[in-house]
């Protein structure tokens, strides 16, 4: 199964963002991953609207937006208009997640849910028919550089095994996504990998070399 390799642009070098985008695309990435945080749902602030707009306009490859924010439905149309092709919401913060996922589809984007480590399959299964992507958090959302939470691993298998019953969404991982975890999780059917400092950024090799190695796992 072909992997979706998605650089987390929060980890990119913003001093030369245009070059980062070009180098990553030439390196063979699939989707740019853009984090939005409000300092409320998660205790941190993510990328600004101007950053997201610039990346969406400059990139040739598609961009996703991960909304770690309260009231995500208020901002769906905004991010779709900026160019986001996939929009993830957190069902933990949205009492009307079903409606918001439909709003994402109506805005012309693919709909996804991002699921915190403590959120079970059973609590979100009624949303899965509306999902094109399900992104499991293997760390608590809001900070880069955390350790992978091993207790989440069986949940990946559960969501992969159930996908065929809910229209065939793709399963993604976000958080502490090292080459070892990519190798392990791709074997159980995880499709997409959000790449941060564990696998892609801040290394001595070129993006092209790293992406080639990750595809070979």
Image: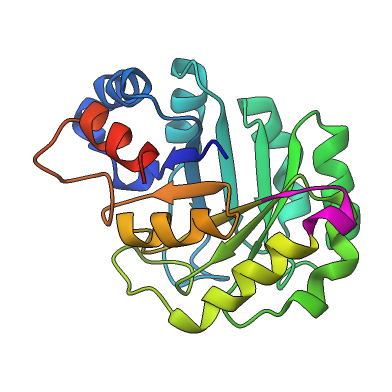
Foreground residue among 185 and 38: 185
Please report the residue visible at 49 percent of the width from the left and 15 percent of the height from the top. 60
**Colour treatment of the image:** rainbow
Residue 123 is covered by the magenta coloring: no
Which residue is at a point 51% across and 21% down the rendered structure image?
61
Q: Give the range drawn in magenta.
A: 163-170
Rendered residue at 79%/63% (across/down)? 162
Q: Where the N terminus falls, by quadrant? A: top right
Question: How many numbered dots are placed on residues in this image?
Answer: 0
The residue at the far left in this view is 204
Q: Tell me residue 215's x, y (percent).
A: 39, 37
Q: Is residue 135 shown left or right of residue 5?
A: right
Q: In which quarter of the image is residue 116?
A: bottom right
- x and y, in percent, of residue 20 in the image: 27, 27
Q: Residue 27, image x and y in percent?
A: 31, 24
From where the camera sits, is residue 37 visible?
A: no
Q: Which residue is drawn at 53% across and 60% down?
A: 38
Image height check: is 10 above or below 43? Answer: above
Q: Position of residue 65 (x, y in %)?
A: 58, 43
Image quadrant assignment for residue 64 = top right
Q: Is residue 123 visible?
A: yes
Quarter location, residue 109: top right
Front-lying residue, 197 or 159:
159
Horizontal relation, residue 69 to residue 196: left or right? right
Specify whether 154 is left or right of 200. right
**Residue 168 lies in the magenta stretch:** yes
């Amino acid at each position: 199964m072909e992997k979706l390799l998605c650089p987390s642009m929060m980890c990119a070098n913003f001093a030369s963002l245009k070059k980062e985008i070009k180098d990553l695309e030439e390196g063979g990435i699939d989707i740019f991953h853009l984090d939005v945080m409000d300092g409320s749902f998660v205790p941190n602030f993510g990328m600004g609207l101007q950053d997201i707009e610039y990346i969406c306009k400059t990139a040739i490859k598609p961009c996703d937006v991960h909304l770690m924010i309260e009231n995500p439905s208020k901002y769906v149309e905004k991010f779709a208009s900026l160019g986001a092709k996939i929009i993830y919401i957190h069902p933990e913060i949205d009492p009307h997640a079903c409606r918001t996922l439909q709003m994402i589809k109506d805005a012309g984007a693919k709909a996804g849910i991002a699921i915190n480590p403590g959120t079970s399959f059973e609590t979100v299964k009624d949303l899965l028919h509306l999902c094109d992507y399900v992104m499991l958090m293997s760390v608590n959302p809001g900070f880069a550089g955390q350790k992978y939470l091993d207790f989440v691993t069986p949940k990946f298998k559960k969501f992969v095994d159930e996908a065929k019953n809910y229209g065939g969404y793709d399963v993604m991982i976000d958080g502490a996504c090292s080459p070892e975890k990519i190798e392990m999780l791709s074997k159980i059917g995880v499709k997409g990998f959000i790449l941060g400092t564990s696998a892609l950024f801040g290394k001595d090799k070129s993006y092209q070399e790293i992406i080639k190695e990750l595809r070979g796992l």
